[in-house]
Amino acid sequence: MITLNHLVRRQGSVEPARFRDYWLTEHAARSAALMQELGVEALIKCETLYDDDAADLLRQVYGTASDGYDFVDQMQIYDFARFKSLLARPEVCASWQELHAGEARYVDHQRSDYWFSVEHRQVLLADHCVATRDNAFLKGFYVARMRDGLSLAEAQLHWNACHGPLARRFLHILPFVKYVQGHRIESRVGTEIKTMLGGGFADSSRILGQAEVWLDRRALMGLQIPEAQRMMRLLVEDIALFIEAQASHSFGAKEHVIFERPPDLEPIPRLFSAD
């Protein structure tokens, strides 16, 4: 599965409640229509939780930057060739450009970004897990910026082959019911989308991707025991080998499933590039 991630920061002059109302109503309806036109299988809007104790705890543990994103929209694509062919239609491009222009009243595009990622599952105690407003689950994001001197392939290899197994070593105390690494993949299509929308986005060239975890916030109480503290120390020390934590971002979110439909074909694994 390839995911198109839209990481969104609102304009500083727009109040969070006003932005939330726009993003989950007018924008959600228009975005859903556009993405279904592009053959996208699911659109999930992940809403950042401000002043959430569990998310604050994770941010302190990981030592990440204090500023984050207001929303992450995730568009899941199973047939990437079909997505590209539909994107080539002038009327589809015009619809996306119109949607993007409307966002400008609310979104700080220069501090927001799009990128494609491919999913590498690390922990899967619950396959279909959604952190909604009416349950105790929290979805944690870690938007990782890789250390200078590493290539995307080198950093992602360590992330998948070393950090993932290290996390699974502590599966009996790890508070995650699901842990997915979203490895950013380079694609001419991503560049074409940004160019078609007028450019001016944040620079994602040093972004490794995003870690996504689903946890029951009550499970975080277990991190107080000595073994759990040792686990977190080892994980943070390993992260420092390939990620620049102070330039990365972690935050908690709740998910809003705008639409979701079962895929009609098997996903094709891809590494490093979608082209």
Image (spheres, grey):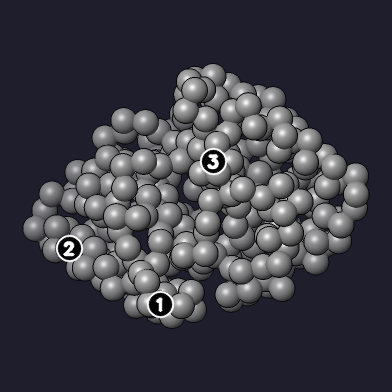
Quadrant location of the N terminus in the rendered image: bottom right
Up the image or down, 9 lies above or below 80; here it is above
Q: Is residue 271 left or right of residue 253?
A: right
Q: Which residue is mark 1?
A: 150
Quarter of the image for residue 117 reads bottom right
Up the image or down, 169 lies above or below 178; here it is below
Q: Disc 1 versus disc 3: distance between alpha carbons?
A: 26 Å
Up the image or down, 203 lies above or below 122; here it is above
Up the image or down, 238 lies above or below 245; here it is below
Q: Amino acid at mark 1?
A: Leu
**Residue lying furthest right in this view?**
90
Q: Position of residue 5 (x, y in %)?
A: 59, 52
Q: Disc 3 versus disc 2: distance between alpha carbons?
A: 31 Å
Quarter of the image for residue 66 reads top left
Precedes in sequence: disc 1 or disc 3 = 3
Q: Disc 2 versus disc 1: distance between alpha carbons?
A: 23 Å
Q: Residue at x 17, y 63 (%)?
A: 233
Labelled pair 2, 1 in contact (Cβ < 8 Å): no
